[in-house]
């Protein structure tokens, strides 16, 4: 997998949230993808479930910003970022796994209560 492609998808993902543009998110996922957000919760499996999850997430109006480099290895990209909703900040690391067509086939979001701050 080409690192430039994976980094571009991550950058598009950030932009999609900040502009509340579901079409960008729809274009990046494979139809049979899996989303775990956060890891350990029930996964969203398949295109319809994933799009419903993101519609709810975007409706909350989060602002996302990378706070470190995207790390690429094999067919995966990991990236640290902050999600801000009002005065709540969540520090998250996402991992995107890509299929042979360059679509995200599995997304894992690593965060929990210890990664949330108010103010």
Image (tube, helix red, strand yellow):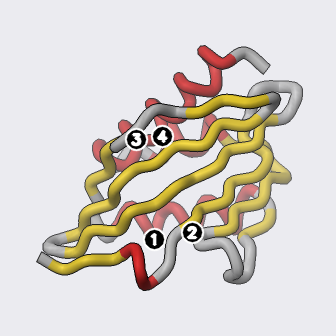
**Disc on the earlier residue, 4 or 1:** 4
Residue 56 is marked as 1
CA distance for labels 4 and 2: 14 Å
Point out residue 109 in the picture as x, y percentages from the top left corner: 59, 62
| Distance from Cα at disc 1 to Cα at disc 3 | 16 Å
| Residue at numbered disc 2 | 53
Dot 1 falls on a residue whose secondary structure is helix
Q: Marks 3 and 1: in contact by CB < 8 Å?
A: no
Q: Looking at the image, which is closer to me, 31 or 114?
A: 114
Kindly report the distance in space between the C-alpha atoms of the residues bearing marks 4 and 3: 4 Å
Tell whether label 1 touches label 2 (CB within 8 Å): yes
Which mark is nearer the camera, 1 or 3? 3
Contact, CB < 8 Å: mark 4 with mark 1? no
Q: Which mark is residue 14?
A: 3
Residue 64 in the image: above or below residue 70:
below
Q: How many marks?
A: 4
Residue 96 lies in what quarter of the image?
A: top right
The spot of residue 31 in percent (x, y) is 80, 48
Q: Is residue 10 left or right of residue 64?
A: right
Quadrant where the image shows the N terminus? top right
**Secondary structure at numbered mark 2:** helix
Q: Are marks 4 and 3 in contact (CB under 8 Å)?
A: yes
* Mark toward the start of the polypeptide (4 vs 2): 4
Which mark is in front, 2 or 3? 3
Residue 76 vs residue 63: left or right? right
Instruction: Identify the residue shown where x is 84% and y is 34%.
Output: 99
Of circles 4 and 1, which is in front? 4
């Amino acid at each position: 997998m080409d690192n430039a492609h994976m980094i571009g998808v991550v950058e598009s993902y950030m932009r999609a949230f900040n502009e509340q543009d579901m079409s960008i998110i729809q274009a990046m996922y494979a139809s049979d993808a899996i989303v775990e957000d956060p890891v350990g919760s029930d996964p969203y499996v398949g295109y319809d479930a994933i799009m419903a999850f993101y519609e709810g997430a975007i409706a909350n109006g989060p602002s996302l910003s990378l706070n470190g480099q995207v790390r690429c290895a094999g067919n995966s990209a990991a990236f640290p970022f902050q999600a801000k909703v009002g005065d709540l900040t969540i520090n998250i690391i996402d991992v995107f796994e890509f299929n042979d067509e360059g679509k995200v086939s599995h997304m894992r979001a690593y965060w929990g209560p210890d990664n949330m701050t108010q103010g």
